Image (cartoon, helix red, strand yellow):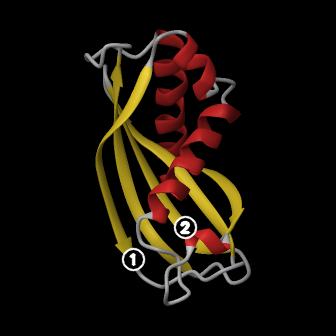
């Protein structure tokens, strides 16, 4: 599990003063990008090598709203890795109280530069599988 901090910007909110529901997907992206970067595999480097990771599935469960200037924690974990897919799980919570706001997951597919399925590079797959195993060890 990797935790990233962010703060709600005014541009993230809607007319009711709460984070617009679609912006939680942006927060999910922040979480998974930072998790991958922590492993020494920044997305920019993967893209330079011709790899694209496209979201092919997303699900969110909204529990409580976030508001402008709230400090948020984005907890991200890799829970499944196959030859061409990666599943990430997320919990977004308020930093001050730990109150969970949104839970969800995304599944990303590995693609080549033309948008065709491509096997995950061995070093990326090994790093991601290590995260799954580490998470399983934490659950025991």
Viewer-side residue, 105 vs 116: 116
Question: Is residue 73 positioned above or below 58 on the image?
Answer: below
Side of 94 relative to 61 (left or right): right
Side of 48 relative to 87 (left or right): right
Badge 2 crowding class, 10 Å Cα cut-off, few under 14, some 14 to 19, many 20 or more, is many
- Marker disc for residue 91: none
Q: Which residue is labeled 2 in the image?
A: 92
Q: CA distance from mark 2 to mark 1?
A: 10 Å
Q: Residue 107 in the image: x percent, y percent?
A: 33, 42
Side of 62 relative to 90 (left or right): left
Badge 1 crowding class, 10 Å Cα cut-off, few under 14, some 14 to 19, many 20 or more, is few
Question: Is residue 95 positioned above or below 2 on the image?
Answer: below
Label 2 or label 1, whichever comes before in sequence order: 1
Q: Which residue is labeled 1 in the image?
A: 62
Give the image quarter of residue 80: top left
Asked whether the beta carbons under mark 2 and mark 1 sit within 8 Å of each other, the answer is no
Question: Is residue 66 positioned above or below 119 on the image?
Answer: below
């Amino acid at each position: 599990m990797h935790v990233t901090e962010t703060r709600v910007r005014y541009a993230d909110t809607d007319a009711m003063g709460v984070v617009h529901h679609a912006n939680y997907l942006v927060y999910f992206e922040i979480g998974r990008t930072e998790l991958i970067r922590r492993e020494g595999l920044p997305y920019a480097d993967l893209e330079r090598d011709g790899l694209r990771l496209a979201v092919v599935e997303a699900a969110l469960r909204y529990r409580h709203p976030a508001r402008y200037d709230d400090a948020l924690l984005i907890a991200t974990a890799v829970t499944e890795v196959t030859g061409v897919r990666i599943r990430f799980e997320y919990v977004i919570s308020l930093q001050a109280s730990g109150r969970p706001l949104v839970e969800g997951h995304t599944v990303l597919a590995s693609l080549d530069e033309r948008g065709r399925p491509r096997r995950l590079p061995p070093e990326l797959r090994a790093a991601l599988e290590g995260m799954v195993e580490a998470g399983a060890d934490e659950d025991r």
